[in-house]
Amino acid sequence: MVRRAPERPFALNATDARYVEACLREFEAAFGLDAFPGVAFAEIPGRALIGRFIDWWRGLDPEGEAQQNAHSRLPGAIRLLDTVSALMEELSQRGAGER
């Protein structure tokens, strides 16, 4: 999943961007983290974002309700980002094939 993700920010529609950013901000607040200090959400590289989500999902054990809620949202955000990665990859390949 991480390797397929773009080096540039994800091409998310407004609804998806709000959802993924909400997942990120909720997780940061619940776990006391600042995942991408000084970087606006729209500028976070896709590969770094999905990689961080996967690392958190696998490596952090939630304690308490806020952390459990934030942690439980990660799989949905990861799946969404992976789907967008696949779409971006397909569109890129189509564009390269049409040249």
Image (cartoon, rainbow, N blue to C red):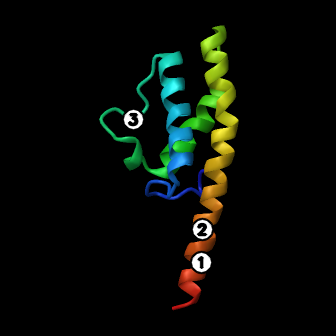
Name of the residue lying farthest toward the front: 15
- Label 2 neighbour load within 10 Å: few <14, some 14-19, many 20+: some
**C-alpha span from label 1 to label 2:** 6 Å
SS at circle 1:
helix
Q: Quadrant of residue 76?
A: top right
- Label 1 neighbour load within 10 Å: few <14, some 14-19, many 20+: few
Q: Please tell me whether residue 81 is drawn above or below residue 60 in the rendered image.
A: below
Residue at position x 54%, y 37% in the image = 52
Q: Please tell me whether residue 91 is drawn above or below residue 37 in the rendered image.
A: below
Q: On residue 89, which mark appears? A: 2
**C-alpha span from label 3 to label 2:** 25 Å
Work out whether mark 3 precedes mark 2 in sequence or the reverse, and give the earlier one.
3
SS at circle 2:
helix
Q: Please tell me whether residue 55 is drawn above or below residue 78 in the rendered image.
A: above
x, y percent for residue 31: 52, 17
Q: On residue 27, which mark appears? A: none
| Residue 31 in view, yes or no | yes
| Residue 1 in view, yes or no | no
Residue at position x 50%, y 50% in the image = 14
In the figure, is residue 32 to the left or right of 87? Answer: left
The residue carrying mark 1 is: 93
Q: Tell me the kind of residue under disc 3.
A: Phe
Residue at position x 60%, y 34% in the image = 55
Q: On residue 36, which mark appears? A: 3
- Label 3 neighbour load within 10 Å: few <14, some 14-19, many 20+: some
Q: Tell me the kind of residue under disc 2.
A: Glu
x, y percent for residue 26: 52, 24
